[in-house]
Image: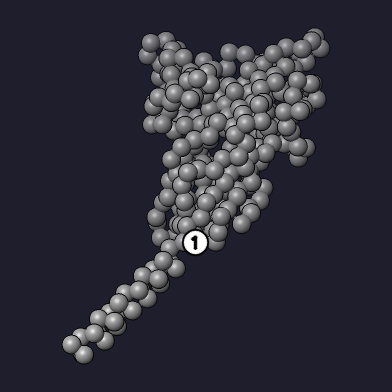
Amino acid sequence: MKRIIPILMILLITFSSCHEDNDDKITLANVTFNFSHNWDGTSVTNSDFNSIKFTNEKGNQLSIERLRYLISKITFYKSDGSITEIDGYNLVDVTNNENLSFSPAAFITTGSYNDVTFTFGFNNEDNSKNYTDLNTASWNVPEMLGGGYHYMQFDGKFLNGSNEEQGFNYHAIRAADNPGENPTFPQDTFFNVSLGAITIASNTTFNIEMNIAEWFKNPNTWDLNALNQMLMPNSSAQIMMYENGQNVFSLKSVNQ
């Protein structure tokens, strides 16, 4: 018995030590995504809405009355090929100053990541599902246009050729041809936004900016006199929005 007790004690000590080492190697962190907005570098909040105070690349003078958009499928990519995808989505509502900060109910393993991305809108699989909260928010797209959900609702007024205020509805959805019972889809118009490489050592906040002016200028200079209403059934306009959206978001800073 005198020989057995020391051996058992050694085994217990060894197991405890290994267990502590493993715990040290696996560290989890919370992540938060904050969304702010600007017009070519000038900060924009809902206090700037409902007033003709912005000028787009084409020279159209305009106001913003409503701006809200959906982000989904936040994904972390490691160099070893492993991928961590966060469930859920966030409807950023600038008009009502709601959901400008999104903290997913998930933890991320600390370490180095080659890239962090999110999707503007929904991919086609997610867009085919049913979301009670988005239905309540009137975020649906009519079935004749393919159904699913909006990616963005951006509404306002602009001064037309007669210098009169006229409304515009810059709504981004899945591009659809042949509106009706059997619409077809010429091109995907959701897109992924890359935030680049990052090393996560602790709880981390990503500060992301949308330059609203970019929706109107690159690569397509947008003339609100020509494209202001009925853009949802216009697949060419939806593809132009998709193209201009590639330069809208940027990573302003990261806090840890």
Q: Quadrant of residue 6?
A: bottom left
Q: Is residue 76 above or below residue 37?
A: below
Number of disc labels: 1
Q: Which residue appears at 54% of the width and 49% of the height?
A: 31
186 relative position to 249: left or right? left
Label 1 belongs to which residue?
Answer: 111
Which residue is more in the foreground, 218 or 142? 142
**From the viewer's perspective, is 52 left or right of 91?**
right
Q: Is residue 247 visible?
A: no
- Residue 48 location in percent, x, y? 77, 27
Q: Return the residue found at the far bottom.
A: 2
**In the rendered image of this protein, does residue 95 appear above or below residue 43?**
above
Vertical order, 181 against 188 (above or below):
above
Residue at x 43% of width, y 19% of height: 147
Q: Is residue 112 visible?
A: yes
Q: Where does the image place residue 245, in percent across and percent down from the top left?
A: 59, 34
- The foreground one among 43 and 231 is 43
Which part of the image, by quadrant, shows the N terminus? bottom left
The quadrant of the rendering that contains the C terminus is bottom right
Q: Quadrant of residue 168?
A: top right
Q: How is the image coloured?
A: one colour
- The x, y position of residue 133, in whole percent, is 48, 25
Q: Is residue 182 left or right of residue 173?
A: left
Task: From the top left corner, tell me how far across and down residue 101 is, in percent.
Answer: 60, 39
Q: Residue at x 41, y 66 (%)?
A: 23
Work out which residue is located at the far front of the displayed protein and give it: 1
In screen coordinates, is 237 left or right of 214?
left
